[in-house]
Amino acid sequence: MANQPDPKFPTFSDLYSHLLTLPAPLLPPGKATSPSLTASISALGLHPTLEVAFHILNNDLPSAHFLVRHMQSPPAYEGMFLHGILHRIESDYDNARAWYDNVSESDVFKHTWVGGKGEALDFVLRVETLKKAGKGNKSDLEKESLDEIKRVVEWCKKQFGEQRMEDASDAWVKPSEENRKMAEDMVSGGEGFRDF
């Protein structure tokens, strides 16, 4: 039934525990790990940042991207950070670095990357090196990727709770003037295409 929690995963904790058993998101998956979980994730009605994180844990990048586009400017630092993580998983490393840089002074980023921006960007570089040159320890990087997402989920759960949100409109932000202009230029063809 639409908008009702999945009987197999009726709570945040049930679904989150299950998602943590799936392969860690690190490199472009091609498709969601478990497509049937997309509806289960949405049906919980979580704060949008938690829903995005859950879609990322399921490697459902289109669903995550759809939601995160509504949270791509301050004060939605959590959504902006998840946008960077999403681009890292998609192997769009320059965009990932740009998003990480945009949120590097935010509380959620500092909570997640205690070693700061340099540590985070080093991680992105190591993932990029694995993808492009086949060098690096994939299982160690998968663990780091999962740990990064778990710390963001921990932060968002503390900030927003795990209860159902009947109205998430407070989580959406208007795009910054710069992002609005980029989007307009993409539609009108003025400046070419940039992935968000």
Image: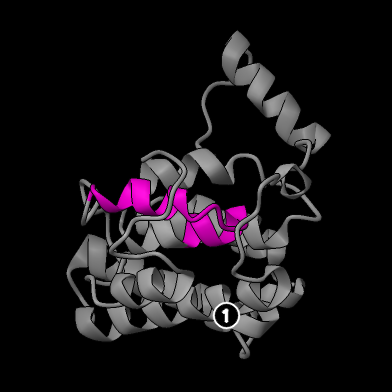
21 within the magenta span: no
Looking at the picture, how far across and down is residue 31, in whole percent? 22, 46
Looking at the picture, how far across and down is residue 152, in whole percent? 56, 74
Question: Which residue occupies the extreme left position in the image?
Answer: 134
Looking at the picture, how far across and down is residue 181, in whole percent? 74, 25
Q: Where, by quadrant of the figure, is residue 26 drawn? A: bottom left
Of residues 47 and 104, which is closer to you in this image?
47
What type is the residue that disc 1 sits on?
Glu
The secondary element bearing badge 1 is classed as helix
Residue at 24%, 77% in the rendered image: 21
Of residues 160 and 9, which is closer to you in this image?
9
The answer to whether 9 is drawn above or below residue 3 in the figure is below
| Magenta extent | 35-53
Q: Which residue is mark 1?
A: 154
Residue at 51%, 26% in the rendered image: 193
Question: Which residue occupies the extreme top position in the image?
Answer: 188
Horizontal side of residue 170 vs 3, given as left or right? right
Horizontal side of residue 34 vs 178, given as left or right? left
Residue at 69%, 81% in the rendered image: 110
The answer to whether 87 is drawn above or below residue 17 in the figure is above
49 within the magenta span: yes
Looking at the picture, how far across and down is residue 54, in whole percent? 43, 61
* Structural crowding at the residue carrying mark 1, measured as other residues with C-alpha within 10 Å and reported as few (<14), some (14–19) or many (≥20): some
